[in-house]
Amino acid sequence: MRRLAALAALALSLCACAGSTTAGAPRCLTGATPRVGRPAPDEMLALMRRERERAARAPSPLVRARILESLPGLFPDASDIVGEPRCREELGAENAAALRVDPLVFSRLLVARLRTVHDPRVLLPLAAGGEERATAYQLGPDEPGPAPPRSLVRHLALASLPASWLVNDQPAGRRLVLDRLREGADARELLLLHGAAAALLREAPSGDPARAQGDAGPSLLRAWLPDLARRLDGPADRVALELVLRRLADVGTHAARSGVGPEARALVERVLAARGELPLTQGLAGAARDLAEVARGALHDLDVPQRSPAGADLPPPRRDRFRVWADWLDAEPAGGEVPAADALARVRDLDGELAALRFSAPRCRVIEELGQWLPPDEASRRFDALVAPVLDGERVRLSTEALCRMRVALRLDGVDEARRVRLLLRLLSATPAQIGPRDTSGDEPRPALGAPLDEEPVGEVAARALARNLGWIDRHADLRAWLEAQALAPVPSGARAAERWSVLQPAFERVLALHASGGPEARPEAARAIVRAWMASIRAAEAQQQGADHAFAGEIASARLRALGEHGGRAGLADEVGAFLGERKDQRAAVIASYLLTL
C-alpha cells in the first residue's frame, strides 16, 4: 500500500498543473479542518487531522513515526472537485523542509519522513549520498537496536524514486543509476535498483550490438557477467542469491540482442552442469533448485529469443526469499517495539473513532490501523467481535467494511491459527447463494461507479490471505481436503473466478507437493489424480485458447505445466508426464518443466 501511495504522490509532484487543484484550495494540514462538500471525503479529512494531532502528542518517537507514516492513506481522492485540498503537496513540502536541514538527525522520525516524501528534487540528492549529511542513528526509548547504518537514508530515498523517472526523465538520475549498477557491490542496493536496470535493458541498443559497449544495456550486461561468476563462487547469502537470480533471468532475455550471447551461454551452462549446486547456494534450502530452474529458463531464452524485451518473471520460490520491502525497507530500522500500554492507548483512540465514523472508507482505514496496533492478547480477545458483522448465520455479509474486516482478521498473528483457518475456510467455501447482496449504505454515493457483475470479492480476499499463509495447508486437514477437491475441478470460465483460481494455484500446488512427498500425511493416489486432472485442464485451455476473453486460463496452464515437472516424478508419473511435456516442446513452460522432471 505504501508503494502505491508513493507512486501516486510522485505523479502529482511531477504534474505542473497538479490535477484539478487551484490556488484557492483550502489548506489541508494547518488551519481549520478542510472540507470539500461531500460527506465521505469530509469525514476522512477530519479523521486525518485528528490523527495528525495524535501524532504530535504521541508518548514516544516510535508511536509518532508510525502514525505519521499512516497519514497519506487518509488523504481522500477528491480530484473531481475544484478546490481539492493539496494534502500530498503540503505533506511533501513539510517533509522536504525537514530533509534540507544539515546535518540530518538520523532517527525513527527521519525514517518516517523519508517514507512519506515523494518530491524528486529532494530525494535525488539524498539518493546520491544522503548518508554523508546524516548523523549516526539516534535510538529511541523503544528501540533496542542495533542501529541501522547511515546508508539507509540513501536507500529509502532511492526506494521512493520510480525507476522509469530515474532513467528516462532525469539525466543526473540516469548517471547515478548507471554508476551504481556497473560498480556497486552492495547486493541490497543493487536489488533496489533492479527495476531501473530492467528499464535500461529494455532500451534498444544502437548500431551493432557486438560493438555497442557504450550503450546502457550492453554495457550493463558486460559488467554483470563477471560479477555473476564471482557471486556464484562467493559465500552463501540469500540477498546475493536474489540478485543473482534476477540478473541471470535478465541475461537470458537480453544477452543475444546486446551482443554477449556466447559469454552468457557459458555462464548459464556452468550453472546447469552443477544443477545449481554452487557455493552461493550451499546450506540454503531450495536455493540450488531455484537457481537451476532460472538458468534453464535463461538458456531457453538464449536459444529462442523472446519477441518482447519485458523479461521473464521468476518462478515461485522454494528458498526463503529475501524481500526488499518486507524484510528491509518496511521493517522497523532498529527493532522498535511499542510498549503494550502505549499500544492499548492507541487502540482506545481508534475504538473511539470507529464508534463515531459513518462511512466505509474512513472506517476501513481505522479497522486496518487496529490490525496494526492490537497487542496479541487483545487481538485474540477481540477476534470474534471483529468478524461478527461479517457473518449472519450461514450467510456471509458483503460490504466494503465487511471485506476490510475479513482482510484484517485473517492477518492477525496474535490470534490462534485454527480460528483464522476456520474463518478462511468458511469464506473460501461460501457459495453465491450464501453471500448476501452487496450493502452499499456505508459507501459514498457515486452513481457512475458500480461493482462488476461477475465480482467474487469474498473468495478473492480469502484466496489472497491463503497465498500469504501456505503453511496452514500442511497443518489443517479440513483446509487441505477443500483445496484438493478444487484442484481436481475444472478451471472456472469467468474472468473473475479464473483470477481467483490463479491466486489459489500455489495453494493447490502445495497440496500436490504434500501428497507426492511420501510423508505421513501423503496420499500418492491423490497426487496422481491431481497431476492427471491438470494435464486435462491444460488440454482444455489449449482447445479454448482462441476464444478466451481473459489471460488467466493461460497463466494457470503455464503454472500447471511447471508443477507437472516439479511433482510429476514424485507422484510416480514421470513417463506419462514426460510424454505430455514432450508434445509441447515449443512452449517455454513445458521446456523448463521437462528439465525439472530430470532433477
Image (cartoon, rainbow, N blue to C red):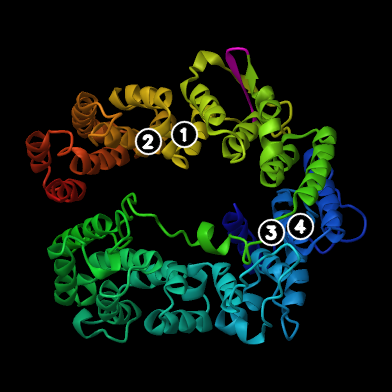
Task: Give the residue pinned by disc 2.
Answer: 507
Decide which of tag 4 and tag 3 comes sooner along the chain.
3
Which residue in the protein does label 1 denote? 463
- Label 1 with label 4: CB-CB less than 8 Å: no
What is the three-letter code of the residue carrying label 2? Ala
Proximity of marks 4 and 3: CB atoms separated by less than 8 Å: no
What residue would you read off at disc 3?
19
Of discs 4 and 3, which sits in the foreground? 4
Quadrant position of residue 128: bottom right
What secondary structure is the stretch in magenta mostly built from?
strand
Q: Could you tell me the amino acid type at mark 4?
A: Val
Please tell me how crowded label 3 is: few (under 14), some (14-19), or many (20+) other residues with Cα within 10 Å.
some
Q: Which residues are magenta?
A: 393-399
- Whole-number angstrom distance, CA of label 1 to CA of label 4: 32 Å
Between the residue at mark 2 and the residue at mark 3, the CA separation in whole angstroms equals 42 Å
- The amino acid type of the residue labelled 1 equals Ala
Who comes first in sequence, dot 1 or dot 4?
4
- CA gap, disc 4 and disc 3: 33 Å
Asked whether 397 falls inside the magenta stretch, the response is yes
Between the C-alphas of marks 1 and 3, the distance is 36 Å
State whether residue 110 is above or below residue 535.
Answer: below
Label 2: state its secondary structure. Answer: helix
- Furthest toward the right, the residue is 32
Q: How many marks?
A: 4
Q: Position of residue 440 (x, y in %)?
A: 69, 26
Element at badge 4? helix
Evaluate if marks 1 and 2 touch, with contact meaning CB atoms under 8 Å apart.
yes
Tell me the residue that label 4 is attached to: 63
Q: Residues within 10 Å of mark 2 (few under 14, many from 20)?
A: many
Q: Is residue 39 above or below residue 234?
A: above
Mark in the foreground, 2 or 3:
2
